[in-house]
Amino acid sequence: MDNIRIAEMFNRMARLLEFKGENQFKTRAYTNAARTIKGLDEELQVLHKEAKIEDIPGVGKILKGKIVEMLETGTFESYEKIVEEVPPGIIEIMNIPGIGPKKARLFYEKLGVESVDELKKAAKDHRIRRLPRMGEKQEEKILRSIIRLEEDKDQGRHPLALGMEIAEEIKDELSSCPHIKKVTIAGSLRRKRDTVGDIDLIAISEEPEKAVAFFTNMKNVEEVLESGISEASVLYPENFRVDIRMVRKDDFGSMMQHFTGSKEHNIHLRELALSKGYRLNEYGFTNEGTGNLIPCDQEKSIYEFLGLDHLPPEIREDRGEIEASLRGHLPQLIEKEDIKGDLHVHSNWSDGINTIEELAEAAIQRGYEYIAITDHSQSTVVANGLSEKRLLEHIDAVERINDKCDDISILSGSECDIKTNGKLDYSNDILERLDIVIVAVHAGLEQSRRKMTGRIVSALENEYVDIVAHPTGRKFGKRPPYDVDIETIISVAKDNDKVLEINSSPWRLDLNDINAKKAKENGVMLAINTDTHAIDHFDNIIFGIDVARRAWIEPSDVINTMNLKQLCSRFGISK
Ligand code: DGT
Ligand code: CA
Ligand code: CA
């Protein structure tokens, strides 16, 4: 179990306890511990091996015992017990945006609601509005949230980062198999889609049956779903399906092309091949006239044969890449090395775990020219947001540290809340003093489309605002995007010369590829930021880059590919 999963279990436990009406101190101990764990630099697994769990600050003895229990058994007894007691649908209800444990309990006690379907029915039958502290508006909100959840396309899919981690682990294990020469990632994972349905692997093997047997017997396989002469599918923990196909060296190129997809891209390629008199499949090109097969051991031969550039996997979605290549207009996709700094970083002044100095040091190690320290604003109490007074001290502290630091420029910033009424969380007098103002929505996520859009639009119209962080608010496994008219946001951003963020946090990836592409096409600049809360998070930049590449984004579309001088002139910073 990794830290993220352990923290997640503690958060779930807290919600279950709250549902049961346990006292606040008990629930808070779990949420606090979860927050501490998420911020740890080191994996608990490692700390446990070194007998250092005891040394974690801010987590009580009892909860430390439960951490050890989870590391050793994958769960803990009191959690299993409470899960038994609470109807399973309640957990889903508590995950609906705008409904916490307290409301779930109210619906359960007063209406006997035990599942999302029952809740939907109760809302439709107007039984919610009659409950204490509820009303027509509340009822409508709940119905809207449920419908949006049902429409969420990411349900049942897994975040890219998790897929990558497991795929690398499997590749490692397969590297010790004597019957496998080479293993490569294919499918949506190779295309770096933000969520993946499963993991697709291609392996070169002269002994496919033995290779399949090795694969189905890997240590973490929970179930073998299918197993054939040259292919197999297994189930990994967390319901992660892994497909493998053993191929001959001579077919490797055509197999890779086929299993990388996407399906739509492949269909388009096949049409192109047919127009040239060839049938294309995973074994190569077949001449329609002679029936001769031309195998391809290299993927690039497929594209060459069709008169195309070797298209980067990230853009193989049939979103115009084939036409662009035929016209010689492919974008020069951005790369990690183009990034010169990070403009969304949290320190221990709010809910980050590192000092400004530590963050600066980590950014220097990554070769950055600048970072902006953007701690939370006062409304975000749970994240220890800064009052105006503390923000002024923060600005001084950043300046002091920056003066001492030759190797990097530290900009003073804020991740300022856009409040539910559309007002910003600090006065303009204060915002004016900051180098970088990022604005973001953190509360009132269930507002109507009109309200939410208006709220962000009014922030974009503020002259001191520079960037909108995670513009749609989605979090994988937690909530779909809030209801917002992204076209309007993009056009108002353009009119006001504002920047939209691609947030690289593996749980957000927001803007997504489709919206980021729209932003680019409408001439809006993007920032690829990590939203770092602990120094390791700087490395999440690769996931933001993946999104950007899928969005056809080039270095010149991204504000933080600028050097310090250009950046300062763009944002009017005197440094
Ligand atoms: P996912 O798993 O939903 O995240 O998305 P993919 O793209 O990885 O899809 P998957 O795992 O079903 O199939 C892997 C690749 O195999 C896919 O990207 C393209 C190829 N493929 C699958 N089904 C078809 C099909 O019906 N026609 C064609 N031309 N290719 C297909
Ligand atoms: Ca797949
Ligand atoms: Ca698959």
Image (tube, rainbow, N blue to C red):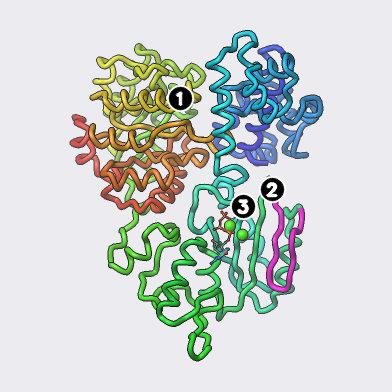
> Where residue 430 sits in the image (x, y, percent)?
28, 16
Mark 3 or 1: in front is: 1
Q: Residues within 10 Å of mark 3 (few under 14, many from 20)?
A: some
Question: Residue at (37%, 42%) from the top-left corner?
Answer: 528
Q: Secondary structure at mark 3?
A: helix
- Most extreme residue toward the bottom is 290
Q: Is residue 118 visible?
A: yes
- The residue that disc 2 covers is 239
Q: Secondary structure at mark 1?
A: loop
Q: First in sequence: mark 3 or mark 1?
A: 3
> Where residue 292 sits in the image (x, y, percent)?
52, 89
Residue closest to the eye, 410 or 542: 542
**Cα gap from disc 1 to disc 2, whole angstroms:** 34 Å
Q: Magenta segment: does it hold 228?
A: yes
Q: Is residue 29 visible?
A: no
Q: Which residues are magenta?
A: 223-236
Question: Residue at (24%, 40%) from the top-left corner?
Answer: 564
